[in-house]
Image (spheres, rainbow, N blue to C red):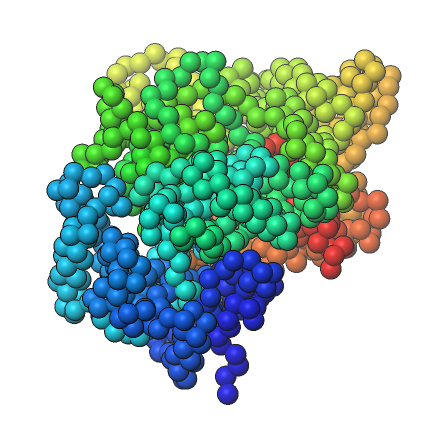
Amino acid sequence: MPGKRIYFFEEGNKDMKDLLGGKGANLAEMKRIGLPVPEGFTIITKICLDYVKTGKWPDGLKEEVTQAMHELEKRTGKKFGDRNNPLLVSVRSGAPVSMPGMMDTILNLGLNDESVEGLAEQTGNPRFAYDAYRRFIQMFGNVVKGIPHEEFEDILNKYKKEEGVHFDHELSVDALKKIIQEYKDLYKEETGEEFPQDAWKQLEMAIEAVWKSWNNPRAIVYRKANNIPDDMGTAVNIVQMVFGNMGNDSGTGVAFTRNPSTGEKKLYGEFLINAQGEDVVAGIRTPKHIDELEKEMPEIAKQLKELAELLEKHYRDMQDIEFTVEKGKLYLLQTRTGKRTPQAAVKIAVDMVKEGLITKEEAILRVDPNSLDKLLHPRIDYSSNPEVIAKGLPASPGAAVGKVVFNPDEAKELGDAGEKVILVRPETTPDDIHGVIASQGVLTSRGGMTSHAAVVCRGMGKPAVVGCSDIYIDLEHETFRVGDIMVRKGDIITIDGSTGNVILGEAQVVEPEISGEFKELLDWANEFKRLKVKTNADLPGDAKVAREFGAEGIGLCRTEHMFLGSDRLPIVQEMILATDDEERRRALEKLLERQRQDFIELLEVMDGLPVTIRLLDPPLHEFLPDLTELEVKLTELKLTQGDPEEIRKLEKLLEKVKELKEANPMLGHRGCRLGITMPELYRMQTRAILEAAIELKKKGKDPRPEIEIPLVAFVEELQYLKKDILDEAEKVFAEKSIRMDVKIGTMIELPRAALIAGDLAKEANFFSFGTNDLTQTTLGFSRDDAGRFIRSYMELGILKFDPFQTIDQDGVGKLMKMCLEDGKRANPELEVGICGEQGGEPKSVEFCHRIGLDYVSCSPYRVPIARLAAAQAAIREKRR
């Protein structure tokens, strides 16, 4: 016998999401605590996966659904499929994880040509009855049979035009009857079948459609974008219909217990009088703000506010509530944890701690570290007087700049190619999700703050302006007009999701800052985290930003970036092209002056904090012109009888470029190999670092430089260069009559270095995992070329993630763990960290915490992300 497969709402609770899906579990919970929820039952999630696999109903399930429907008939006093007193239901999806709008729902199921007449007689409201039937045919045809939504809308719009009305609810009963007939004709034309009149057949087809929707393209895209597993499945909820379209004492709406854009503690949402739920979320009619409900339905507004407060306290989180009012009675159709912007997530988490609803640990765990990225990027600078051409609703905050694109497929194509685009649509639908993901932001002319575009963009932290009625969109010609201004496909616009402004061209922006609740949350993170968080920074400006963001030092300063300035590159080339020691010495002296100043500025910004400076790493040919370009230039000069002196110089340069050219430079003459074959280079850098530190020390500062040797594979390399560095240090100390500690360490970028960590640790003060190169050399993937196949590998399931973004814990991670343990065993004082860009990726930060690293280091704008991720890792470990 199979286990229990159907649960009436009173049989479940909020902790049964894996079994009942989020919607079913929360309906059950609301029923359990006595809230006004319609009657209904849930078919468990596992059945979806069975059906998707086999294409068949599990044995006996149809009979169980029939029994459940008969029980529903008893509870409601109505009869399913009956002409005179029909029971109508909605068939709704509901995955364990919220996927708003991605799967399918059908309303008003159970209506047919006969029961619609009975419903009209029973309610005394034929307009309502025929409107409900019209909606049902449209939803059923679209969801179950895939008939394009637009084909139904064309018929609807034709009759609205004929009757001279703007909105669906203004259509006459005669018009609705004609629309229903045309809808049924369309259904037959598209499917070759009559529209089903048997309510039980309708129910069977609708349940199957909901199961199939688990694997519809938009659901797959959404799961991939949000890292939701494919093996969860969706539950199916069969719910007694309650109607918001029965007249002016009825309505429907969506309410958030706090503002999902800003986090403000105030009921926020929208509603429509005489409408059904899809009218609000689909943006078909622009709804009214929830504040206006007090004027239109004061008693309902009071009740809704009380229930919203009760639900927020019960769930201890901001709730997103769907409600319907039927003839003056309020029903709650759904509650779920509300999608929110990163800004709102931070404010809500901090405010709820102060209100005593949650603990600091819970607040820290509530905020997705990746979402902080959206708070750490520039916003629009209005002092530069940008040209604001229109204003809509500020649905999801942040500034987005890009080329205007009207087609979601094209948005994906251009976005995947690296172009920045803004998707402009009358309104978005769940089928547009791939285009939304690929865009920088979304602009719609219709819809409200709870429309599909608004909800999805808020969940992704993507800027959105919706309901911008100032713009007229012409999809056919791919333009939109605002007054006399015409904006065409490919034109640049800026949208400001914080104000609703639409700006012509690229607006100027201002840098973000950490303050208010954001600073408070990160201060709490410092109370719990064990890992230090440093930054990768080569320039004083970057270091200053990182320090403001809470960096505890520099974990990687790449000195090669200091060689690339217009005043440096010619000197570096002079050093490379030197034909004798004296020429090279003169070039290095010029570089010494500049490097010393670089280090003074960097160490001064990071005063009192460690600064790990990596000696020159890339091969020398990277500082010389490209071989092919040089050959072309030389040939052109010779063919045009160019200046003989310039030709001679270029010939000498070409000879050197050919001499230094390597078949595989990533594994060639670079890193410590360069320091060993050209010792004067590393000595110059050592001198520059120590002279800079001594100069600052004499001014009463506290510089803490650390010297890092790259690409070590043999302990003898480290010993050789360490001796050279210490010899140069002694010379500097003698000349300056001042001494200081010199910490010397190495990067672990090669598998061999990880394998001999015990030997290296006896010579080093610290290790730093260069996970970019360690990933390349462990996997045998070239970072520059692997992009050609990594995406295919991920789609095929060979890779679960890009190993250059998230640490490969099974391969690279095992080497790191072994290296760490061997190194610490040989040298208990050894400090070990990571300086690859994975140092700011939350899953990698958690791994670094788990294996016992001392610090992570990442780019300045990822420092707050790493701080929060490190705190979350510590809290989760404590809870385990």
Q: Quadrant of residue 297?
A: top left
Q: Is residue 753 left or right of residue 659?
A: right
View extreme (bottom): residue: 1
Residue 843 at x, y percent in the picture:
61, 50
Is 864 located above or below residue 361 in the figure?
above
Q: Is residue 862 left or right of residue 821?
A: left
Residue 274: in sight, yes or no?
A: yes
Residue 481 at x, y percent in the picture:
24, 26
Please name whichever residue, 739 or 717, is drawn nearer the observer in this view of the structure. 739
Residue 258 at x, y percent in the picture:
56, 40
| Residue in the picture at 31% in, 18% down | 637
Q: Is residue 503 left or right of residue 164?
A: right
| Residue in the picture at 61% in, 56% down | 809
Q: Is residue 29 left or right of residue 380?
A: right
Please name whichever residue, 640 or 549, is drawn nearer the observer in this view of the structure. 549
Residue 142: in sight, yes or no?
A: no
Residue 369 at x, y percent in the picture:
60, 43
| Residue in the picture at 24% in, 56% down | 126
Quadrant of image for the C terminus: bottom right
| Residue in the picture at 29% in, 38% down | 426
Is 876 located above or below residue 601 in the figure?
below
Q: Quadrant of residue 118?
A: bottom left
